[in-house]
Amino acid sequence: FAQWMHHAYPRECPFPHVSGTVQASSRREFRSSMAGHVLEADALQAEVDGCAAEEAVAAQELPWTSEEELFVHVPVAKPREGWLRHCVGVAAMASMLVATLRSAASGAGSVGMRKGEKCLV
């Protein structure tokens, strides 16, 4: 998929090299390695013209590697939960249970209205 993304969006997605096959270099290292590779204007124009002819051939054939690099996910050990967290959870559940029971008890008394009571609507 990464190779396809590189061919679809070559400026946004770099080519996915297999790990260990390429080494990144700093700007200074790159400049020093390319120091003798300067073209004059006429040589540069000839190179551009040659690339235009190669683009027609390259448009038909994409560089594709069949090597696949699989990543293994190593699960991280889950930290133990402390006793305080369990106590807080039990207290929260108990408070919700008490609130539900009080609400049910107050609602049950108002279902059967006594004779003579008036309701406000």
Image (spheres, helix red, strand yellow):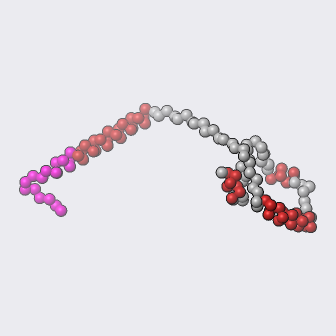
16 relative to 29 in the view: left or right: left
Does residue 42 lie above or below 101 as drawn? below
Point 76% across, 42% down: residue = 20
Magenta-tinted stretch: 105-121
> Where residue 2 sits: x, y (%)?
67, 51
- Left or right side of 104 for 34: right
The x and y percentages for residue 22 are 78, 46
- For the image shown, how many numbered marks are present on the structure? 0
On the image, the x and y values in percent for residue 12 come to 69, 58
Q: Quadrant of the C terminus?
A: bottom left
Residue drawn at point x = 79 percent, y = 50 percent: 26
Relative to 16, say whether 50 is above or below: below
Tell me residue 23's x, y (percent): 78, 45
Q: Residue at x 43, y 32 (%)?
A: 83
Q: At 90% from the left edge and 57% from the top edge, which residue is drawn?
A: 37
Left or right relative to 115: residue 42: right
Asked if residue 115 is among those painted magenta in the image, a careful observer would answer yes
Q: Quadrant of residue 5?
A: bottom right
Please check the rendered image and state whether residue 51 is part of the magenta-colored stretch, yes or no. no
Please tell me which residue lies in front, 2 or 112: 2
In terms of depth relative to the viewer, which is nearer, 72 or 75? 72
Q: Quadrant of residue 117?
A: bottom left
